[in-house]
């Protein structure tokens, strides 16, 4: 084994030879043997081996293996030095191998070492992006779980930092091709990360690119297979995929395939859905996704049939008024529960799809069914007015910090929900029904262009068609639906409350 002095002497021989260093193979071999020495010799070898690597192509394998041994040394300072120098080996056909080695080294738990690996990978990306990606994807497809996980995370966080001259169209196409191979067998978390990777690619941000991504998501969602509501994994996969698809939909990239699947397979099984996610209101989650997608639904093959399914599900959440006893009091033990969160989603979806078949309520349903619907709608609307008044009274005069308490955040969102339902109900009371109003779903941030609509909808909260009073004594205030105090807390607790809800609703 060479000593420190011998390493320095042979280093001097190679350095003095400059471009003719390749003629001194024996001197380079002494440096390679330095990896078998002590800590000082190893540290010198870690610096000297890469410095003269390019002059000895016939010793390339030996040199890379020697440096790799140093990358796995027990001494952390030696490992760090060896990793830092690895990009110098990334020349020609050696680059994919170096990328493969660096990808494996991502499993390091030493933060400084891990950062060195990241920096080394980024530096060879700038030399040869395709070769580097080849090494990364090789480990993603065949490497150990920890390496696969960290390689995917590296791509999801670092790709977007690379300049356009590196991420060319050819490179982006290579990423898409390799990603499709990985997506044949991924976990839910991995799928989300790959959608993040692909969505960030410039070539996939066009209309055709987003359409391609939607088709990719549809494949993952397995929309051709029979839906099993009692299988938590099946339900979870559908929801994970749909969440990834929703941001891709637009007036040019339609959600028709997903909306159709939800109407035909998910809605009829809504009460049977199971989920592996503890505490998740799976029914509300499904209805929220359907509502978000319904805005971008294109021409649907079975529109009337699916509107009927949506209509029937809406009726389940819009109860009939309780029967009255002869003395005018309610015959039942308690008032029906009005589930505003669910109704907002269902009404919005029905309103969006109803635009495509505006005569559905007047020509596609029998008179009795329409009459029943109007009664339910009127009863729900009356309860809605009481609730809106209660919420406005509770929030009156509250600003700033007062609106940031959890209770008031819930009330603010509840007011957004009820105002939305109010606007949608008014449209359906028109003869014939109108589908012209625009609302922003309560969990979505309100765009500036919607401000006028939002103000008009909130200011006209009590401007609903009046129900004709029946002959005889009028029903007094006690018989109008009056939600019990605090009801919004339990019924609306599954919404995520962002600052936008508070800020946009302070003016109510």
Image (tube, rainbow, N blue to C red):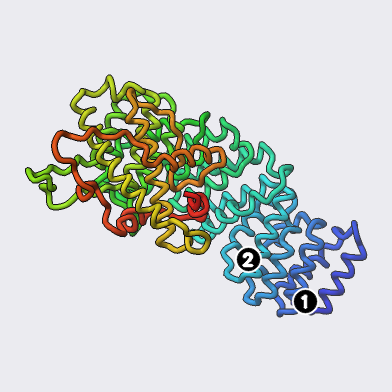
Q: Are marks 1 and 2 in contact (CB under 8 Å)?
A: no
Q: Which residue is mark 1?
A: 2
Q: Residues within 10 Å of mark 2 (few under 14, many from 20)?
A: some
Q: Nearer the viewer, residue 227 or 370?
A: 370
x 24%, y 40%: residue? 379
Q: Is residue 207 above or below residue 292?
A: above
Could one spot residue 234 in this view of the protein?
Answer: no
Could one spot residue 488 in this view of the protein?
Answer: yes
In the rendered image, the quadrant that contains the N terminus is bottom right
Q: Is residue 274 above or below residue 108?
A: above
- Point out residue 398 in the picture as x, y percentages from the top left corner: 47, 59
- Point out residue 245 in the picture as x, y percentages from the top left corner: 47, 40
Residue at the right extreme of this rendering: 16
Q: Which mark is residue 114?
A: 2
Q: Is residue 17 above or below residue 506?
A: below
x 47%, y 44%: residue? 244
x 43%, y 46%: residue? 442
User: Could you say whether the residue bearing mark 2 is in a helix, strand or loop?
Assistant: helix
């Amino acid at each position: 084994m060479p000593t420190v002095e011998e390493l320095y002497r042979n280093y001097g021989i190679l350095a003095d030879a400059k471009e003719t260093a390749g003629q001194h193979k024996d001197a380079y071999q002494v440096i390679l043997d330095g990896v078998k020495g002590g800590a000082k010799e190893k540290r010198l070898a870690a610096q000297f081996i890469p410095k003269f690597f390019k002059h000895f192509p016939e010793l390339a394998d030996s040199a890379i293996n020697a440096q790799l041994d140093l990358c796995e040394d027990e001494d952390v300072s030696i490992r760090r030095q060896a990793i830092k120098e690895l990009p110098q080996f990334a020349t020609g056909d050696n680059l994919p191998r170096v990328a493969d080695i660096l990808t494996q080294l991502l499993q390091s738990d030493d933060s400084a070492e891990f950062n060195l690996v990241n920096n080394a990978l980024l530096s060879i990306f700038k030399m040869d992006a395709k070769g580097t990606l080849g090494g990364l994807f090789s480990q993603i497809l065949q490497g150990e779980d920890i390496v696969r996980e960290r390689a995917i995370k590296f791509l999801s966080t670092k790709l977007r930092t690379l300049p356009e001259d590196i991420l060319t169209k050819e490179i982006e196409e290579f990423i898409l091709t390799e990603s499709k191979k990985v997506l044949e067998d991924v976990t839910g978390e991995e799928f989300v990360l790959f959608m993040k990777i692909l969505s960030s690619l410039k070539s996939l941000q066009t209309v055709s690119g987003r359409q391609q991504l939607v088709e990719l998501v549809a494949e993952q969602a397995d929309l051709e297979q029979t839906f099993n509501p009692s299988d938590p994994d099946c339900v979870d996969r559908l929801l994970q995929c749909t969440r990834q698809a929703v941001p891709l939909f637009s007036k040019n990239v339609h959600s028709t395939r997903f909306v159709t699947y939800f109407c035909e397979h998910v809605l009829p099984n809504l009460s049977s859905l199971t989920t592996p996610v503890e505490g998740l209101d799976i029914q509300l989650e499904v209805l929220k996704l359907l509502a978000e997608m319904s805005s971008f639904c294109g021409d649907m093959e079975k529109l009337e049939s699916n509107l009927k399914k949506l209509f029937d599900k809406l009726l389940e959440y819009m109860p009939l008024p309780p029967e009255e006893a002869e003395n005018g009091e309610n015959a039942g033990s308690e008032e029906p529960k009005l589930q505003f969160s669910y109704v907002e989603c269902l009404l919005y979806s029905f309103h969006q799809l109803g635009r495509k078949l505006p005569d559905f309520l007047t020509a596609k349903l029998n008179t009795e069914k329409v009459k029943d619907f109007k009664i339910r709608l009127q009863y729900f609307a009356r309860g809605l007015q009481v609730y809106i008044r209660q919420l406005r009274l509770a929030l009156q005069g509250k600003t700033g910090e007062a609106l940031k308490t959890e209770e008031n955040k819930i009330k603010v969102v509840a007011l957004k929900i009820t105002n939305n339902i109010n606007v949608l109900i008014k449209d359906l009371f028109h003869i014939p029904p109108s589908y012209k109003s625009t609302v922003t779903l309560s969990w979505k941030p309100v765009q500036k262009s919607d401000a006028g609509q939002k103000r008009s909808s909130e200011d006209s909260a009590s401007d609903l068609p009046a129900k004709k009073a029946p002959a005889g004594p009028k029903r007094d205030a006690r018989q109008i639906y009056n939600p019990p105090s605090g009801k919004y807390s339990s019924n609306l607790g599954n919404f995520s409350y962002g600052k936008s809800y508070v800020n946009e609703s302070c003016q109510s």
